[in-house]
Image (spheres, rainbow, N blue to C red):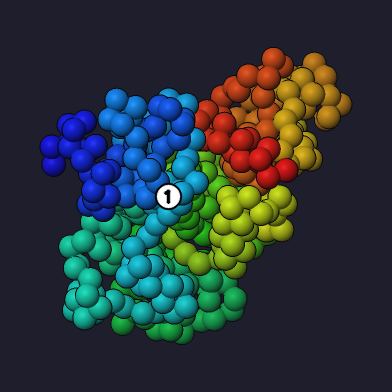
Amino acid sequence: MNLSKERMYRAIIEKDSQFEGIFFTGVKTTGIFCRPTCTARKPRIENVEFVFSAKEAFQRGYRPCKVCRPLEHSNQTPGGIRSLLDELNSDPALKFKDADLLARGLEPHSVRRWFLKNHQMTFHAYQRMYRINSAFKHIQQGQSVTTAAFDSGFDSLSGFGDSFKSIFGFSPMKGKSQRVIDLTRLETPLGTMFACAVQEGLCLLEFTDRKMLETEFRLLSKALNATIVQGHNAHFATLENELAAYFAGGKKDFSVPVFSVGSNFQSRVWQALQSIPYGETRSYQQQAAMIASPNAIRAVANANGMNKISILVPCHRVVGADGNLTGYGGGIWRKQWLLDMERANK
């Protein structure tokens, strides 16, 4: 596509849907940004600039249009793939082959490419991971290795054993004494997030472009002596519903349990974060005073930076002493958006 300013302007005049997800229109006179297909009255060409991500739009000072809602479903999983994921959640033993995908009107190559982009593995590898995760939990619940293997869709014990060991690093026979951390992917108006959970609760919620994400995965796995694997967890459904309500401005508190992993000092800092009311902010100095450590401002800031559970443990509500926004793992533009949204719905 020729993405000259004139071509993009013609696209918004024609409401050309083929440009959805390619660019956003920033309207200088109103300070909003829109989808190419927005039905609002079109501005003059000299009053627009084109940006190629929501992040860039925010950084240039634009806010999302209330007509076309450019942030909603910006990373939504395609309907056909969503159906596959829902069925795997219900029955991890299912095996979708290329012929099954074609029968559903899905192109196997496109499905493969989507999973590689969003999960760093092929769809078939994703299915195997889900089956292994399911078998692991059955073993922990007292099921025999043989029953767990065949109930999870494996055709042979040897194949099951090899796959199990390649993922977890130990044999199925040792499964009862080991632990797994479930991982899932969520879409939000501010981008894709990864969530991790164990039986006790949610232990990680981060945007997928967070620079420290791989380090956080490694530290979490080490702290819990567990392997992080794609899989279903009962807490994920509650989290997804509550996050959707939060981003829509209708949810101020979360009921999904949080299982933060850190030192005693970090835990105190994170508990203080959870006590900051929705729609309000605190400085690092105020947060330090909240935990009765008024001189530990720098340590408090470091502990905030080590928080692995975004939004639910709201480190975005902590700002500089002068009120200016300070560092945020998800990016300052997201921090600004979250604070603005909460203030508007307080």
Residue type indicated by callout 1: Cys
What residue is at 18 percent from the left and 33 percent from the top? 6
Please provide percent x and percent y for residue 269: 74, 33
Residue at screen point 24% across, 37% down: 9
Locate residue 34: give its quadrant: top left
Whether residue 127 is situated above or below residue 219 in the rendered picture: below
Is residue 46 placed above or below 321 in the rendered structure? below
In the image, is 198 to the left or to the right of 164?
A: right
Q: Position of residue 125 (x, y in %)?
A: 30, 63
Residue at image point 44% right, 60% down: 230
| Position above or below: 154 against 321 | below
Image-quadrant location for residue 201: bottom right
Image quarter where the N terminus lies is top left
Judge left or right: residue 68 versus residue 52: right
The reply to whether residue 241 is in sight is yes
Position of 54 with respect to 155 (left or right) is right
Q: Secondary structure at mark 1?
A: loop
Query: Which one is nearer the viewer's eye here, 322 or 117?
Result: 322
Outermost residue, left side = 2
Which residue is painted at 74% across and 27% down in the image? 282
Task: Look at mark 1 in the image and give the residue it sits on.
Answer: 68
Between 83 and 346, the one nearer to me in the picture? 346
User: Which image quarter: residue 337?
Assistant: top right
User: For mark 1, does the 10 Å Cα neighbourhood hold few (<14), some (14 to 19), or many (20 or more) residues?
Assistant: some
Location of residue 153 with respect to 320 vertically, above or below: below
Where is residue 252 drawn, in percent x and y? 71, 50
